[in-house]
Amino acid sequence: MEIRYFNLFIGLLFLTLALILFFRRSPNKRPNTFLGVFFLLITFYSGFIVFHFHSIHTRNMSQLSYYLPLDVLLLVMMSPCFYFYVLQLLHRPLKFIHPAMLLHAVPILLAMVFNVLFYFRPVDERVDWLIRNFHEGSPEMTVINVALYLQILFYFIITLRALGTINRWSVHMFQHILKSGLAWVQLFLLANTVFLLGSLPVYFLINNQDTALWIGCTALYLDFFVLFIMAILKIDILDARVNKEKKVLHPMDPEKVSTEWQTLINYMADSKPYLDENCSVATLAVSLKLKDHQLSRLLNKHGKIIFADFINEYRLKEAIIYLEDQSKNRKNIDMIHIECGFGSRTTFFRAFKKVYGISPKAYRKKHDATYNKL
């Protein structure tokens, strides 16, 4: 009984974190949205574990008749969601229409098909299968759980690789992690990877759904413990930062910096990459034949500016041209953000007011009044 309440408590904790991430204003809004969804999936999963345990142990046939293995679907969705969160923190563009990205949806679709097929089985057959699978296991769930283990392990590895943690696997790794802006992400992944590999023999030794659910419960407790440790160490999980400049340890050649800076300025003027809302450190660095951290450091050291402000500076200059346009077919204010590369009207208005102190609408009105006096 105490375990049930503790699971509910953990679920409420992750639900609270999810809501904070959804509604809190932050420069990490897009990454935090993915993290919020991830925490929301954990919340639902903890609820399903409680429901499953309670229904089986109390032999509540009524509850079992309505039960669907949605916990499988939730687990399948968690890993890609966390992976996308990390990619967004690293300023990697996400193109969901791309064929490679659609591959992430394949396990989710398979889990949905499994739930649909399960739903259309006779109720008595479903209930008998759930009880038998809970105590004795079944070939279907063994295959599904093995696939889940492989999927989760795969995403952990590619996420750690994206963060560069695997490349730094040494006795000094934890010292580096604690100094990085993504400390909680790396520790979270490392702890779960070790637990995943350690729990695998346990599952195959006992091989039933009761064991699988207990492993799931323990994973929840581990995640709760990691967040608790993060709180003690005062590591912020809501505003994780990527400090890529620290990767470059050698001083930059002044002449080379000057050349690269001029190349960057010329490229911005000629190609106008900032007009694409998906313009990122990664995409711009590729165009300039630089590495991500080299471009970030170039902006930081030579331009004394971060990437987001650098790009917005160009976008706002483009917006000024549209706002000062006096032709009859000039752009409507609500459409200017699209032409200038801003992801949304709200982002455009916020960035404009931050720099100019007034809204785009007020700026145009003021400029029109000045123009009409001439």
Image: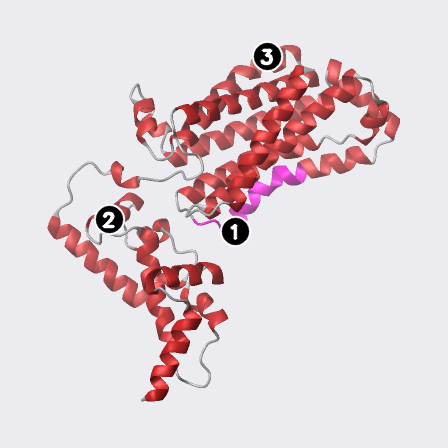
Residue drawn at x 66%, y 21% is 5
Task: Work out whether residue 235 can be spotted.
Answer: yes
Nearest the viewer among 354 and 64 is 354
Neighbour class for label 1 at 10 Å: few (<14), some, many (≥20)?
few
For this orientation, the residue located farthest to the top is 205
Disc 1 marks a residue whose amino acid type is His
Labels 2 and 1: the sequence-earlier one:
1
Quarter of the image where one finds residue 171 = top left
Does residue 3 appear to the left or right of 36 in the view shown?
right
Per the picture, the main secondary structure of the magenta-coloured stretch is helix
The residue to which callout 3 is attached is 202
Say few, some or many: other residues with alpha carbon within 10 Å of mark 3 (under 14 / 14 to 19 / 20 or more). few
In the rendered structure, does residue 245 fall within the stretch colored magenta? no
Residue type marked 2: Asn
Labels 3 & 1 near each other (Cβ < 8 A): no
Residue 4 at x, y percent in the picture: 67, 20
Q: Do the residues labelled 2 and 1 touch (CB within 8 Å)?
A: no
Instruction: State the CA–CA distance, disc 3 to disc 2.
Output: 50 Å
**Place of residue 16 in the rendered image (x, y in percent of width and height, measured from the top left):** 56, 35
Would you place residue 149 above or below residue 33 in this image?
A: above
Residue stretch rendered in magenta on the structure: 93-110
Quarter of the view holding residue 216: top right
Per the image, the residue denoted by label 2 is 300
Badge 3 or badge 1: first in the primary sequence: 1
As drawn, is 229 to the left or to the right of 54? left
Question: Secondary structure under badge 3?
Answer: helix
Q: Where is residue 110 in the image (x, y as percent from the top left)?
A: 67, 37
Q: In this view, does 161 lie to the left or right of 98?
A: left
**Position of residue 210 measured from the top left corner of the image (x, y, whole percent):** 69, 16
